[in-house]
Image: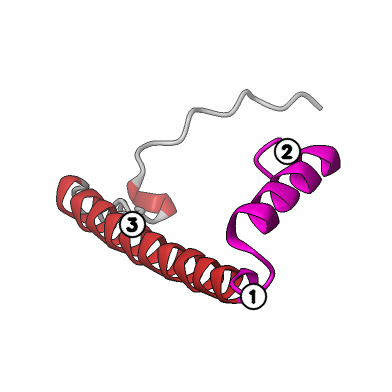
Amino acid sequence: MFGIGFQEMLIILVVVLIFFGPKRLPDLAKSLGKGIAEFKKASEEVKKGIDEAMKEEIAKEEPPAPAIATPPETPTLPAETKGPTPPQPPSQG
């Protein structure tokens, strides 16, 4: 948490205990906890607002995807109308 090790946290707690005293320490911790919770809530709301704005901008910038058109089928001609058949070589026999 914030790159602070156990020894640093212990020193900070001792200094706070000396500075504020044991009677005010629980109230101070409670207030600090509420402040951190409110900060997290506000930052999440800001993040949601930014995400929604980004989604709206992306939706405005992206053109709708083109519909995939299937090519029209080419009409097939019956076998007799395809043209003359090549001449057959004479059979030997």
Question: Is 56 on the left-hand or right-hand side of 15?
Answer: left
- Quick one: label 2, few (<14), some, or many (20+) residues within 10 Å? few
Which marked residue is nearer to the observer: mark 3 or mark 2?
Answer: 2
User: Which circle marks residue 42 in the picture?
Assistant: none
User: Which circle marks residue 4 in the picture?
Assistant: 2
- Quick one: label 1, few (<14), some, or many (20+) residues within 10 Å? few
- Quick one: label 3, few (<14), some, or many (20+) residues within 10 Å? few
90 or 58: nearer the viewer: 58
14 or 2: nearer the viewer: 14
Q: On the image, which quarter does residue 75 sit in?
A: bottom left
Q: Which residues are magenta?
A: 1-26
Q: Residue at x 72, y 52 (%)?
A: 13
Among the two numbered marks 1 and 3 on one chain, the one whose residue lies closer to the N terminus: 1
Is mark 2 in CB contact (under 8 Å) with mark 1? no
Q: Position of residue 52 (x, y in %)?
A: 28, 61
Question: Is 7 on the left-hand or right-hand side of 42?
Answer: right
Element on which disc 2 rests: loop
The residue where tag 3 is placed is 51
Is mark 1 in CB contact (under 8 Å) with mark 3? no
Which marked residue is nearer to the observer: mark 1 or mark 3?
Answer: 1
The residue where tag 1 is placed is 23
